[in-house]
């Protein structure tokens, strides 16, 4: 018999679940208060009023019994729903891997540039985004930390991408005038499944250009 795998949930998914469960608790408490007041009113009416006692325990005994049982059943169902509620996976937004930044154009990678890519990166390097100089000025290179100890995990992945795609100059800076959207898209999908635009938006931020189709 195969073991049941317990899914792991992200911080965002756990937060959404807790908010949902808190709302259910508040709703159930409100319903229980309403039914509780109704039940208390009926009990007091039956105890302190001869007419109420006659109506609820004699003339409408079946109606009273049905009402009480119905209240208990509804409360039990609400409790079971709250207990049975489990977190659910959130579908992360998916972005087109061939979308270029604003006012850039997508083109086939030049043969010499393609050959300069790392062998493992070539399958994702067939297309490249380049700045359209008609609308945008040439971008200044963005600084990428060369010392591994000074990089964050995200910066480390950007540095590896830049190395594989031959986008790091001798000064250790990222070329901000071309990028490989497919490679970045696959890296975002693999490394950041819950935020599949993280690397692309970080590069856009470092280089100072807009990428509204990926970083809304």
Image (cartoon, rainbow, N blue to C red):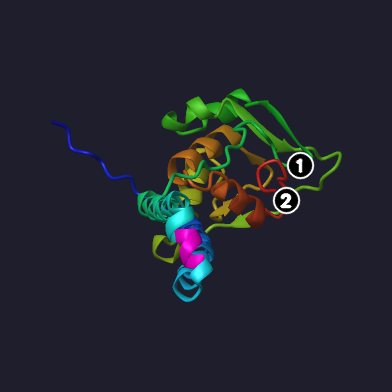
**Gap between marks 2 and 1 measured at Cα:** 8 Å
Is any part of residue 14 visible from this angle? no
Q: How many marks?
A: 2
Query: Is residue 188 among the parts visible in the rendering?
Result: yes
Q: Main secondary structure of the magenta part?
A: helix
Position in image of residue 88 (x %, y %): 43, 45
Residue identifier under label 1: 102
Q: Where, quadrant-wise, is the N terminus in this rendering?
A: top left
Residue in view at x 47 percent, y 60 percent: 56
Instruction: State which quadrant residue 156 falls in.
Output: bottom left
The secondary structure type at the circle numbered 1 is loop
Res. 209 mark = 2
Do residues under tags 2 and 1 come within 8 Å of each other at their CB atoms? yes
In the rendered view, tell whether residue 86 sits above or below residue 121. below
Q: Residues within 10 Å of mark 2 (few under 14, many from 20)?
A: some
Magenta region: which residues? 52-56
- Residue 148 or 190: which is nearer the viewer? 190
Q: Decide: few, some or many residues near mark 1? Use Cα within 10 Å; few <14, some 14-19, many ≥20.
A: some
- Return the disc, 2 or 1, that comes first in the chain's sequence: 1
- Relative height, residue 189 to residue 216 (above, below): above
Return the residue nearer the eye: 4 or 94: 4
Where residue 44 appears, x then y in whole percent?
48, 73
């Amino acid at each position: 018999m195969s073991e049941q795998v317990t899914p792991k949930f992200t911080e965002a998914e756990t937060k959404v679940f807790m908010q949902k469960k808190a709302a259910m608790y508040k709703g159930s408490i409100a319903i229980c208060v309403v039914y509780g007041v109704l039940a208390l009113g009926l009990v007091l009416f039956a105890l302190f009023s001869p007419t109420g006692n006659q109506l609820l325990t004699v003339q409408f005994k079946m109606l009273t019994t049905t009402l009480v049982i119905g209240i208990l059943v509804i409360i039990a169902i609400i409790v079971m729903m709250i207990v049975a509620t489990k977190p659910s996976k959130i579908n992360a937004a998916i972005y087109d891997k061939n979308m270029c930044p604003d006012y850039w154009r997508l083109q086939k990678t030049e043969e010499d540039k393609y050959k300069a890519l790392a062998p493992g990166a070539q399958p994702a390097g067939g297309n490249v985004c380049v700045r359209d100089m008609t609308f945008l000025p040439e971008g200044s290179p963005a600084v990428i930390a060369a010392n591994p100890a000074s990089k964050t995990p995200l910066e480390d992945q950007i540095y590896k991408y830049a190395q594989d795609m031959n986008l790091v100059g001798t000064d250790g800076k990222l070329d901000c005038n071309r990028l490989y959207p497919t490679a970045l898209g696959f890296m975002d999908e693999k490394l950041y499944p819950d935020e599949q635009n993280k690397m692309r938006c970080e590069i856009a931020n470092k280089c100072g250009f807009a990428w509204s189709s990926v970083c809304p």
